[in-house]
Amino acid sequence: MNEPVTVTRRNTLLGATTIAAAAAMGSPINVASSPAIAQTPSLPTSGNPYAFEGGYPTKDTTQRARDDMDYQRAIVAYHFWYPTVSLEGFFSGNRQAGLADNEALPLAQCTPHWVAFTGNSDTPCATGVLDVKDAPMVIELPAGPFVSLVNDHHQRWVVDMGIPGTDAGKGGKYIILPPDYKGEPPAGYKAARSSTFKTLWVLRSIPQNGDVNAAIRAARTIKVYPLSDPTKVLKYVDVTGKDIAGSAVPWEDNIQYWQKLHEVLDYEPVLHEFRAMYGVLSQLGIEKGKAFDPDARMKLILERAARDGKGQMLAASFDSSRPDRIVWTDRRWEWAGFVSDNGNFHTPSGIDQEGRGRWFIQALAGSPAMFSRSPNAGSLYWLGVRDKDGNWLDGGKMYKLTVPQPVPARLFWSVTVYDPETRSQVVTDQDKAALRSLFELKDVSKTIPTELYFGPKAPSGQEGRWIKTVPGKGWFTYFRVYGPQGPAFDGSWRPGDLEQV
């Protein structure tokens, strides 16, 4: 915080805001001049920054006010549209791996090689793009231990399938309808309508008795095809161990964020409930059916808003002050999702934008089953970012986590370690990031508490219950419980805090 901050004087408040922020942090400030931009006197860091003469704004005030308004619009838009751009980043990762929309689906026992927001290696999974623009897509789900969902392009929930769905694991034919579908859906299908053309399909195939190969074979029995041609069944491609960059991290803090957002909105239909936000974007030069070509001024504003917006969302996500984040008052664990009764962060007063942003800058996809806090719901997600003493988790230190047994999980449970910069599984030469009841921990005692370890070096004799972390970097964890039961909610069971050892 004591390093000098160099800013450039300009005839807009873009520089003044940076000066004010640096001054507030107590940082010494060096002001550099730029030959390409006109010089103006230092702008005030407090009070009214706008001057009026005879009731009218001065030329400098008008320019500064315009810049301020566009920056504020861009910040609001960045937060609101983040789930859309994030999902497009995931889609892009599939395409770069050669998996075209409506043609191929990746199927894998996920590892840290697959960069995706809080993806995990708990089960084999398949995730892909289903585009319903030309025809509804059918998902034939046989009976079995499957957990599946569909989200639209804005990561809004469309339908749950499998164990958390209406078929309750008994299987069924699901059909995903386009937003403009006319008439009644075909008989014999469980129909769900998407509000966008491109959708995300996610499948988890739960390994019975830890048999991954059997779970992968079971997943391959699921058929996905367009209603117009059942012979065009999408093929599964095994991507286990392959590097897939399935996130929007490269786009988050630069002009690409807005370019990708424009591409998505140009393809997708206009949603009535988003009309106010489309209006905000139009002031920034982003409109459906029109080219996006910002001038130098607007590009500067948009790039700054992308940088600041990302920082704001990460700070709010990892260091929230909301009381409802706390799971148990005597523990550091937090709820990863704030809204528990639906999949779209709706509340009686509107959309919980902070809760929505917290989830989607950390995670991918959402559904009611993922957030429900009731026995035998789909799953629970608890976030750990601090140790018992309230300090950030440090990759250079050793921690112990004590998990009382039995864990109240009807299906399974796991603890996964993530890198806060990529929000993906931590990458080390150990090539693993999770401790799982289906695999490493399948033989632990059901009466004696299980001790798990996290740090740069394995404790002697605990190599099988340890995840390697990276010195010099922070980390965070998700504690997941699938098929949670009563004690996970009433407080009679709770994991310990992460303790330094």
Image (cartoon, helix red, strand yellow):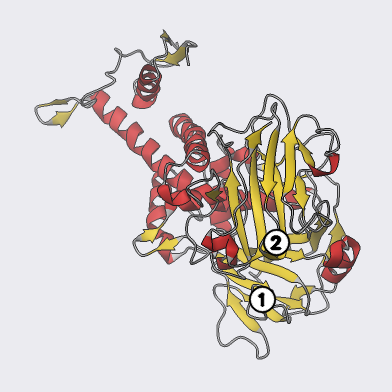
- Residue at x 29%, y 32% (from the top left corner): 65
Pick whichever, 243 or 229, lies toward us: 243
The reply to whether the C-beta atoms of the residues labelled 2 and 1 are less than 8 Å apart is no
- Residue at x 79%, y 61% (from the top left corner): 105
* Badge 2 or badge 1: first in the primary sequence: 2
For residue 267, above or below residue 474: below
For residue 293, above or below residue 340: above
83 relative to 136 in the view: left or right: left
Residue 437 percent across, percent down from the top left: 77, 56
Q: Mark 2 Cα within 10 Å, few/some/many (few <14, many 20+)?
A: many
- Residue at x 71%, y 31% (from the top left corner): 398
Residue 6 percent across, percent down from the top left: 46, 13
Judge whether residue 99 can be spotted in this image: yes
Q: Provide the residue designation for mark 2.
A: 129
Q: Provide the residue designation for mark 1.
A: 136
For residue 53, above or below residue 1: below
* Residue 49, quarter of the rendered image: top left
Pick whichever, 306 or 113, lies toward us: 113
